[in-house]
Image (tube, grey):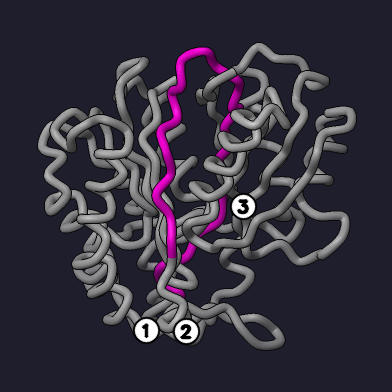
Amino acid sequence: MPGSRVLALGHYQPAKVLTNDDLAGLVDTSDEWIRTRVGIRTRRIAEPGETVAAMATEAAAKALAASGLAAADIDLVLVATCTAVDRSPNTAARVAAALGLGSPAVMDLNVVCAGFTHALASADHAIRAGSAVNALVIGVEKFTDVADWTDRTTCVLVGDGAGAAVVTASAEPEIGPVVWGSVPEMGHAVRIEGTPSRFAQEGQSVYRWATTQLPPIARTVCERAGVTPEDLAAVVLHQANLRIIEPVARRLGAVNAVVATDVTESGNTSAASIPLALSKLVETGRIPKGAPVLLFGFGGNLSYAGQVIRCP
């Protein structure tokens, strides 16, 4: 097949909700402070037993059920995550075992917040090369495991969850060319380091980079896909911070698009944020089937990756 398409989506979020007022009881902050600076109202927090693999499996099961494919049809599983605790079996293998997928290739990718769009591009490439026919692509994080709950500038951001897509071979390509890259010399601006690992960032540096450097790259993504920003039905950026999402979308010039703002209720879920937000938009019927949608991930390593897909 000359291309691939997203066949179905699914998502999962823990039931526990952490509000801004709840956070005000933990650190020196307030609902007004958080909303003004990052636009977040609530976030979901996984319980101890809700592991990265468990959340990934829930989202993947929903996507697989919606796709109409059988478990045995999946021959590739890619999981984007930076918060999996165990090194082996990897999360993709645990998802495959839980869903009874047979013998797919199983790989985890760690590109932090740009992980899902990197994984989606990798699945598209594998299908185009003939190495796979049907892939499960999952973004999942238990970001609260690496939060520093004493740092009010970062702990107010994070949330947990998972989103998944079933990608299949297609005679008509519906996943556009990826534009990806990084700024390695600025990789220290977003960190999950140490033992135990803790999330930290240089917020102002990330904000300046995202709002000034990413809009022209996002326009290049559209050009590679043969669409203009005005053609887009939706823009799903990494849900980092509403104060980044809004200016990037505005400078992109996607004047007719629905702009995903799931960050307000889910927080920053890193690699899970794009598939989680996209799945919700599709589930609620806010994007017409077949319409062009820009997906654009960015963050840790100061990595980025984006592509235009057709809405399933």
Question: Circle 3 is placed at which residue position?
Answer: 80
Which of the marked residues, 1 or 3, is nearer the chain's N terminus?
A: 3
Quadrant in the rendering for residue 100: top right
Question: Circle 2 is placed at which residue position?
Answer: 188
Residue drawn where x is 17% and y is 49% of the image: 252
Residue drawn where x is 67% and y is 23% of the image: 64
Which of the marked residues, 1 or 2, is nearer the chain's N terminus?
A: 2
* Residue 74 is one of the magenta-drawn residues: no
Q: Which label number is shown at residue 202?
A: 1
Where disc 2 sits, the SS reads helix
- Tell whether label 2 touches label 1 (CB within 8 Å): yes
Residue drawn where x is 62% and y is 64% of the image: 82
Q: Is residue 273 above or below residue 103?
A: below
Q: CA distance from mark 1 to mark 2?
A: 8 Å
Where disc 3 sits, the SS reads strand
Indicate left or right for 84 with 139 as reference: right
Residue 4: x and y in percent read 54, 24
Magenta extent: 155-181
Residue drawn where x is 39% and y is 56% of the image: 42
Quadrant in the rendering for residue 130: top right
Q: Is residue 190 above or below residue 82?
A: below
Q: CA distance from mark 3 to mark 2?
A: 20 Å
